[in-house]
Image (tube, rainbow, N blue to C red):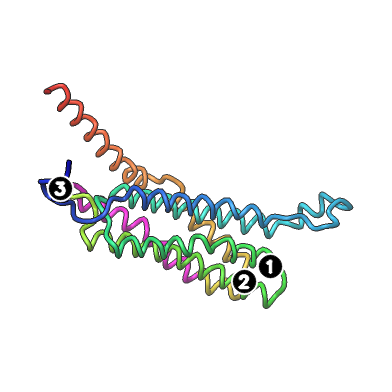
């Protein structure tokens, strides 16, 4: 029975990442599910159903773009947490800030879908939408940069792996800024550009596949090492 004295052995510095990953996955799942609730037929759709379905194209476009963007953000977040050895209080708070923005994304998605085709409101809606996507992308990049500079990544992570993930997270930032400006004149074209950025993160290009193999290799090595220890005992 313990007498209140801490157990012998080195104390772990930092916090485990299991609950952080569980909360993050839950928020991403809810946000991505809420998007479909904004695709609603008008009350008189029964009179011209086909025309009503076709008239919802802004909602379809916004849904696909936001679904792809949230999915891309989740993929990046998943890779980041795979590289984490531990977390600290600041990292957890940055992660909560990212989740705050991700959970907010269904709102600007609905605003854009509702006001597309209405000239001035369309430009405002596209700008708010673009800034929301940019903020989510920036926070994901900041999360990774903080993890690296605070030495929260696994000690066996190579410089090549760090550089590769940084390169994958960076290009979209400038793209969002350019497309936000484009959206002031051509809102629909800007939103299609946001989809292209999301697909850049989602489609497994060669470098991305290389990056995705690093954590798997590490886990395989861990399992192999554990098996050898069992055989030895």
- The part of the chain drawn in magenta is 156-178
The mark lying in front, picked from 1 and 3, is 3
Q: CA distance from mark 3 to mark 2?
A: 62 Å
Quarter the C terminus occupies: top left
Tell me, for residue 3, which label it has, or none.
3
Residue shown at 86%/51% (left/top)? 46
Q: Residue at x 35, y 64 (%)?
A: 93
Q: Which residue is mark 1?
A: 116
* Whether residue 31 is situated above or below residue 189 in the rendered picture: above
Mark with earlier residue (2, 1): 1
Q: Position of residue 42 (x, y in %)?
A: 79, 58
**Residue 168 lies in the magenta stretch:** yes
Q: Is residue 232 above or below residue 216?
A: above
Q: Are marks 2 and 1 in contact (CB under 8 Å)?
A: yes
As helix, strand or loop, the secondary structure at mark 1 comes to loop
Nearest the viewer among 106 and 180 is: 106
Mark 3 vs mark 2: give the one in front: 3
The image's mark for residue 18 is none
Q: Is there CB contact under 8 Å for labels 1 and 3?
A: no
On whether residue 38 falls in the magenta region, the answer is no
Lower sequence index among marks 1 and 3: 3
Q: Relative to residue 166, is residue 105 drawn left or right?
A: right
Provide residue 166's location: percent of width, then percent of height: 31, 58
In-image side of 43 versus 224 (left or right): right
Q: Residue 125: which disc? A: 2
Label whose residue precedes the other's in the sequence (3 or 2)? 3
Query: Residue 97, position in %: x, y?
Result: 41, 65
Toward the viewer: 52 or 30?
30
Q: Is residue 206 above or below residue 165?
A: above
Residue at the spot x=15%, y=47% of the render?
Answer: 3
């Amino acid at each position: 029975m313990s007498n209140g004295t801490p157990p012998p052995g080195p104390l772990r510095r930092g916090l485990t990442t299991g609950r952080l990953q569980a909360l993050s996955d839950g928020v991403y799942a809810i946000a991505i599910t809420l998007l479909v609730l904004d695709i609603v037929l008008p009350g008189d759709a029964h009179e011209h159903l086909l025309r009503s379905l076709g008239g919802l194209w802004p909602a379809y476009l916004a849904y696909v773009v936001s679904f792809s963007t949230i999915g891309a953000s989740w993929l990046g977040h998943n890779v980041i947490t795979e590289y984490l050895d531990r977390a600290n209080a600041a990292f957890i708070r940055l992660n909560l800030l990212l989740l705050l923005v991700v959970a907010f994304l269904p709102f600007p998605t609905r605003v854009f879908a509702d006001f597309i085709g209405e000239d001035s409101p369309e430009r405002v809606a596209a700008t708010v939408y673009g800034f929301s996507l940019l903020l989510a992308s920036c926070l994901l990049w900041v999360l990774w940069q903080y993890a690296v500079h605070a030495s929260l990544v696994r000690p066996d992570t190579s410089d090549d792996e760090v550089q590769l993930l940084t390169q994958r997270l960076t290009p979209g930032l400038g793209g969002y800024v350019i497309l936000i400006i484009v959206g002031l004149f051509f809102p629909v074209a800007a939103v299609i550009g946001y989809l292209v950025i999301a697909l850049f993160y989602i489609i497994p290009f060669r470098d991305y596949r290389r990056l995705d193999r690093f954590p798997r290799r590490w886990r395989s090595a861990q399992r192999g090492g554990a098996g050898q220890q069992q055989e030895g005992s």
